[in-house]
Amino acid sequence: MILIVLRAKIRPEKRDEWLAGISQYTADVRSEPGNVSFDYFANGEDPNEFAIVEVFADSDAGSAHVATDHAKNFFTWMPRVVSEKPRINYQDLDGEAWSEMAEVSPE
C-alpha cells in the first residue's frame, strides 16, 4: 500500500482556481482502479494551506496514477497556483494503510 501526504500552500489570489482544480482532480483520481482513497483538507489556521492524503493499492497503482493524463495535467497546472514548492511524505507500507485508533471509540 502506498500512502502519500502532500502539503501545498496556495497563492491567495488563486484559491478559487485551486479549489476548482483540486475538486476535479479528486474526482479523477478516485476513479482510478488502484486508488484506495484521495482527500484534501484546508488548514484550520491558514486557509491557503492544504493537505492532500492519497492511498493507492500498491506501487503499480501509484505508477499507473502518475502516468494518467489527469495527473500529468495537474502537475503542469499546479505550479501556477502554489506559492512555494509543496512538501511530500511518501510511504510504501506492507498491509493496510489505516487501522482503528485505540484511544477513541464512539459512545
Image: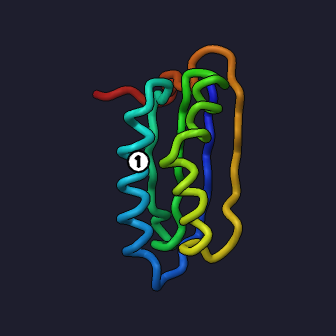
Colour scheme shown? rainbow
Q: x, y percentage for residue 6? A: 61, 52
Image-quadrant location for residue 85 = bottom right
Image point (44%, 68%), residue name:
18
Q: Which residue is the extreme one toward the top?
A: 95
Residue at 48 percent of width and 48 percent of height:
70
- From what the image shows, is residue 44 above or below residue 60? below
Q: Quadrant of the N terminus?
A: top right
Number of residues whose C-alpha sits closer than 10 Å to that of mark 1, classed few (under 14), some (14–19) or many (20 or more): some
Q: Residue at x 55, y 22 (%)?
A: 57
Does residue 87 appear to the left or right of 53 in the view shown? right
Front one among 29 and 13: 29
Q: Please tell me which residue lies in front, 97 or 36.
A: 36
Amino acid type shown at disc 1:
Thr
Q: Residue most toward the bottom?
A: 13
Q: Please, what secondary structure does the residue beneath circle 1 have? A: helix
Instruction: Indicate the quadrant containing the C terminus: top left, top right, bottom left or bottom right.
Output: top left
Res 62 quadrant in image: top right
Give the number of marks: 1
Image quadrant where residue 84 sits:
bottom right
Residue 30 position, x and y percent, is: 40, 37
Q: In x, y percent, where is residue 76? A: 59, 62
In the picture provided, is 103 more to the left or to the right than 90?
left
Q: What residue is at 32 percent from the left and 28 percent from the top?
A: 106
Q: Relative to the observer, which residue lies in front, 4 or 101?
A: 4
Report the residue marked by disc 1. Answer: 26
Q: Which residue lies most toward the front here?
A: 69
Q: Please determine whether, in this image, residue 6 is positioned above or below residue 62.
A: below
